[in-house]
Image (cartoon, rainbow, N blue to C red):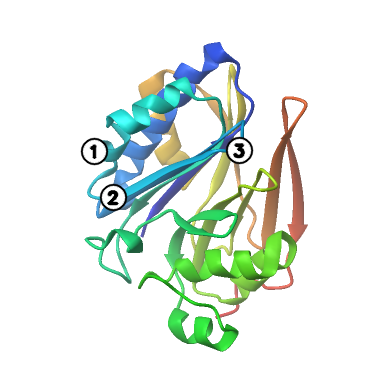
Amino acid sequence: MCGVFGTIGDLPKEARHFAHRLMVELAIAHECRGTDAAGYAALTSRGRLLWKRQPGPARDLFGDADFAALRRQRVAMAVGHTRLATTGAPAINGNNHPHLAGDWVLVHNGFIPAHEEKATALGLALHSQCDSELLVQALCRYGERAGPDKCLSFGGKQSVLAINMKTRRMLAWTNGEMPLVAFRVEGLPGLWWASTEEIAQDALAAVGLDARFAEAKPGLVYRMEVCDGQVVIQTERTRATHHRR
């Protein structure tokens, strides 16, 4: 339906060029999962969020001057998205990803049924027609611990990457209805995410890099942060399961 990808890590200056190239190639490779819109959000080591979204294929956005300028930034974590629109016209840019609420920025692959009714029942105000916004509003309301469980309880199809700008942590999860893989690139510090291994392999081949992969396990929330230059990952199983609708 859509594509999600991202990275977290404290990269030395000499590695940032390759990381930037890999993000561009990941964006282009994920066009097979949607070309209606594309977007990205990057959190710098100083806590500044740089983000952009627009209708059209990813190669247009990730090939422009704004994204090229990120090579001069020390990026601590970033997420990207390619969209195949389901709810919310991509011509209205507020319907596109990433979605922001409070300290959170989120990209989502999937579909949340009856999202407006669920938002109303919880008293959550949506500012777009996109069902994915429900997830970031729930994270904003319920926080880093209870938020993912609430999101998974909405059911539907979910693979998610989210950044908390305040705590400088990245979250990832899938309910098993949409693919999500993590990988570590040989010679490049940090942890990377993509929708599928096949898509990531296409991007890696374009840059001339190799990687080791692991599929995200349904119902597990992966919490990541950078400590002393290393990516620390904690996992927690939520009460909600991928069988709930």
Rendered residue at 61%/47% (across/down): 165
Q: State the separation of the CA atoms marked 1 and 3.
A: 26 Å
Q: In the image, which disc is placed on residue 60?
A: 1
Kind of residue indicated by mark 2 = Gln
> Disc 2, disc 1: CB below 8 Å?
yes
Can residue 202 be seen here? no
For disc 1, the neighbor class at 10 Å (few under 14, some 14 to 19, many from 20) is some
Left or right, residue 172 beside residue 177: right
Residue nearest the observer in this picture, 130 or 193 = 130
Q: Nearer the viewer, mark 2 or mark 1?
A: 2
Label 3: which secondary element: loop
How far separated are the C-alphas under marks 2 and 3? Answer: 23 Å
The answer to which of marks 2 and 1 sits earlier in the sequence is 2
Q: Residue at x 72, y 25 (%)?
A: 229
Q: Quadrant of the N terminus?
A: bottom left
Q: Quadrant of residue 48?
A: top right
- Label 2: state its secondary structure: strand
Amino acid residing under circle 1 = Asp
Q: Position of residue 243 (x, y in %)?
A: 60, 75
Q: Is residue 125 visible?
A: yes
Number of marks in the image? 3
Of callouts 1 and 3, the N-terminal one: 3
How far, Cα to Cα, is label 2 from label 1?
9 Å
Q: Measured along the vertical axis of the image, is residue 231 above or below residue 85? A: above
Instruction: Identify residue for label 3.
Output: 47
Q: Residue at position x 50%, y 54% from top?
A: 179
Please state, as top left, top right, bottom left or bottom right, where the C terminus lies in the image. bottom right
Q: Amino acid at mark 3?
A: Gly
Query: Residue 210's spot in the image, x, y percent?
Result: 51, 23
Q: Nearer the viewer, mark 2 or mark 3?
A: 3
